[in-house]
Image (spheres, coloured by chain):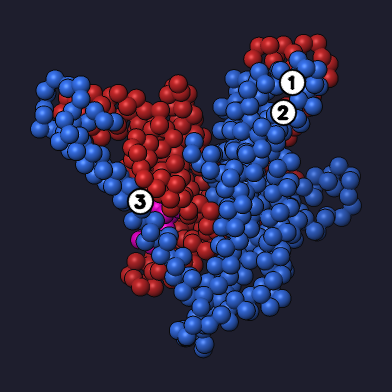
């Protein structure tokens, strides 16, 4: 982009090497365009994302007494989080569910991503789009649909009864951690398939063919060549799946039944019912620290993906 | 590639069997992904007041009921207006950033990209709580303006990244030619960049609209007394469920599917035509 010229030179024939003064003008114009381009979004994200996070951080050191904020610095909120069984249980449940969901999503996503990238031929674009588009339907409605599926008179129970597999409807399907796990897998499977697909796509067919030329079975070629080469996609998908599962609110709220709460539900209860904003803020900060830690660990594989 | 395929399919029974198993598995995954959507649409036509199997008769009554329920229609109208505003806003701040990222050298590029993408990884519940505490300073914005701002914040990050990846393949020689002929920056943008990037911009607008339209968690925090459709639907899910909700959901799901499918196809087609 060094050809951009100051308007003053107008239609002058292009000089092979602009003089130092012209270069300075070009550089200035470049800089102005970069600043103009990035300024709106950086300002926006600072005001509506960075500052709210800082506000949460500040609030987390305050306390609430009789519905009034007490502005004295204290670590009481954090002490409570790490000592109260309610909060610890919520964090533990969130971690367990996110881990479980990530593992299952990985197992489910590898074959489908491999199939689309390597075996679908001309249909790959349309299949990939078909994986993604449910993701754009409001999660409220998608989770609601699982209520219709998992309920005692829902699709799945009726189907099993009809098939003679069960006599009584399975009541543990809905309003349980099982339901949360199913809902989260459903919600975030497309998100795992995308980076995996990109990784499989980058593994050249000739490399796989080479392995098979050397007498590797298709299975062995997959396990020892294709999958290791697609490892970055596996990690990126896992990181996103875990992070989104950890902080998800809609799915546990609609399908969890409220007996055992995930951390996001506790944050909303602190805000909505207990009016304990500092408590909710402290929980949010701990959650954000966990997420940043996960990102930091997976950054090695994330960075080249982001650069694309 | 042909060699690879020849080896894979060249008379190896096991390989072909594996291929069939893989295709069958893929079909199952697609059933899993689309079953809930099909069920919600199917139950919208069920003539029983409490939807469930077996479906004996079909009716359009619930759609009629939905269209004559003021709460639902007000929510629908509010959601359409607010999502339109936030999609336009998000695209307007994403486009210049995407151009700068794609075409210029930027110092601290990683930092800039991290800042732009940060809202993606933050849980919606955290963003919602942070925003509601921010809007305590400006209580007048609580309600519709706050919802538009919140959704623009959530969608601008991936809008920037989608536009950025499309603009990377943009024929830059056109820009240089125009600038050589003395066109101003604004003229280059409106007469060359925008017409050529229009499909990507439109795709991003549609995605941002669809996403903002269905978003509930953050909107709930900053909504005040404003009721978007997801907020109305969420509220009614606590009480006795009217099949009218199913009907509205079915319509919205169909519209979302069409919008996102169209925009994703545009994005992919553009990627293909601009691929080196």
Give yes or no for contact between labels 2 and 1 (Cβ–Cβ under 8 Å).
yes
Q: Which mark is residue A41?
A: 3
Q: Residue at x 23, y 39 (%)?
A: A27
Dominant SS in magenta: helix
- Chain under label 3? A
Which tint was used for chain A? blue
Q: Residue at x 58, y 53 (%)?
A: A296
- Chain under label 2? A
- Left or right: where does residue A163 sit relative to residue B50? right
Asked if residue B251 shows in the view, the reply is no
- Chain under label 1? A
Which tint was used for chain B? red
Q: Residue at x 58, y 52 (%)?
A: A295
Q: Name the residue carrying label 1.
A: A211
Give yes or no for contact between labels 1 and 3 (Cβ–Cβ under 8 Å).
no
Q: Are marks 1 and 3 on the same chain?
A: yes
User: How far across and down, in percent of the image, does residue A255 sit?
Assistant: 68, 58
Q: Which mark is residue A196?
A: none
Q: Earlier in the sequence, mark 1 or mark 3?
A: 3
Q: Nearer the viewer, residue A63 or A298?
A: A298
Q: Earlier in the sequence, mark 2 or mark 1?
A: 1
Q: Nearer the viewer, mark 1 or mark 3?
A: 1
Q: Residue furthest bottom?
A: A66
Q: Residue at x 35, y 32 (%)?
A: B198
Kindly report the distance in space between the C-alpha atoms of the residues bearing marks 2 and 3.
41 Å
Q: Name the residue carrying label 2.
A: A225
Kindly report the distance in space between the C-alpha atoms of the residues bearing marks 2 and 1.
7 Å
Q: Is residue A55 magenta?
A: no
Q: Residue furthest front?
A: A20
User: How far across and down, in percent of the image, does residue B53 sit?
Assistant: 74, 47
Q: Nearer the viewer, residue B157 or B146?
A: B157
């Amino acid at each position: 982009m060094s050809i951009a010229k100051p308007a003053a030179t107008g239609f002058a024939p292009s000089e092979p090497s602009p003089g130092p003064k012209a270069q300075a003008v070009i550089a200035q114009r470049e800089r102005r365009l970069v600043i103009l381009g990035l300024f709106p979004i950086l300002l926006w994200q600072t005001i509506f994302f960075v500052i709210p996070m800082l506000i949460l951080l500040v609030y987390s050191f305050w306390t609430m007494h009789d519905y009034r904020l007490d502005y004295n610095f204290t670590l009481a909120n954090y002490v409570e989080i790490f000592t109260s069984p309610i909060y610890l249980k919520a964090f533990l449940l969130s971690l367990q569910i996110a881990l479980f969901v990530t593992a299952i999503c990985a197992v489910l996503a590898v074959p489908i991503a491999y199939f689309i990238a390597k075996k679908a031929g001309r249909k790959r674009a349309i299949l990939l789009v078909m994986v993604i588009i449910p993701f754009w339907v409001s999660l409220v409605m998608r989770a609601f649909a699982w209520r219709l599926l998992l309920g005692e008179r829902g699709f799945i129970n009726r189907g099993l009864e009809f098939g003679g597999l069960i006599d009584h409807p399975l009541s543990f399907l809905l309003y349980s951690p099982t339901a949360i796990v199913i809902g989260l897998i459903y919600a975030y499977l497309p998100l795992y398939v995308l980076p995996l697909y990109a990784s499989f796509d980058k593994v050249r067919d000739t490399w796989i063919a080479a392995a098979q030329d050397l007498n590797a079975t298709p299975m062995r070629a997959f396990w020892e060549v294709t999958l290791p080469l697609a490892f970055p996609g596996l990690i990126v998908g896992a990181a996103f799946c875990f992070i989104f599962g950890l902080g998800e609110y809609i799915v546990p709220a609609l399908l969890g039944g409220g007996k055992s709460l995930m951390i996001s539900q506790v944050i909303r209860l602190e805000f909505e019912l207990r009016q304990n904003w500092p408590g909710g803020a402290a929980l949010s900060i701990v959650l954000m620290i966990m997420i940043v830690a996960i990102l930091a660990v997976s950054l090695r594989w994330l960075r080249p993906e982001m650069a694309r | 590639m042909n060699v690879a395929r020849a080896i894979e399919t060249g008379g190896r029974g096991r390989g072909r069997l594996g291929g069939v198993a893989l295709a069958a598995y893929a079909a199952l995954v697609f059933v899993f992904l689309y079953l809930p959507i099909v069920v919600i649409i199917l139950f919208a036509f069920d003539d029983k007041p409490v939807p469930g199997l077996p479906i004996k008769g079909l009716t359009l009554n619930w759609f009629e009921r939905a269209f004559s329920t003021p709460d639902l229609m007000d929510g629908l109208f509010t959601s359409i207006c607010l999502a339109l505003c936030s999609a336009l806003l998000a695209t307007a701040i994403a486009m210049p950033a995407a151009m700068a990222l794609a075409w210029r050298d930027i110092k601290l590029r990683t930092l800039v990209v991290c800042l732009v993408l940060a809202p993606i990884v933050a849980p919606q519940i955290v963003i919602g709580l942070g925003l509601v505490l921010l809007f305590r300073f400006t209580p007048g914005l609580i309600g519709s303006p706050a919802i538009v701002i919140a959704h623009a914040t959530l969608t601008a990050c991936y809008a920037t990244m989608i536009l950025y990846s499309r603009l990377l393949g943009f024929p830059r020689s056109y820009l240089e030619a125009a600038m050589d002929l003395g066109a101003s920056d604004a003229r280059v943008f409106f007469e060359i960049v925008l017409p050529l990037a229009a499909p990507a911009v439109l795709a991003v607008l549609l995605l941002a609209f669809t996403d903002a339209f269905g978003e509930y968690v953050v909107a709930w925090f900053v909504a005040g007394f404003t009721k978007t459709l997801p907020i109305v639907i969420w509220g009614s899910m606590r009480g006795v469920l009217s099949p009218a909700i199913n009907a509205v959901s079915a319509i919205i799901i169909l519209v979302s599917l069409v919008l996102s499918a169209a925009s994703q196809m545009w994005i992919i087609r553009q990627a293909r035509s601009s691929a080196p």
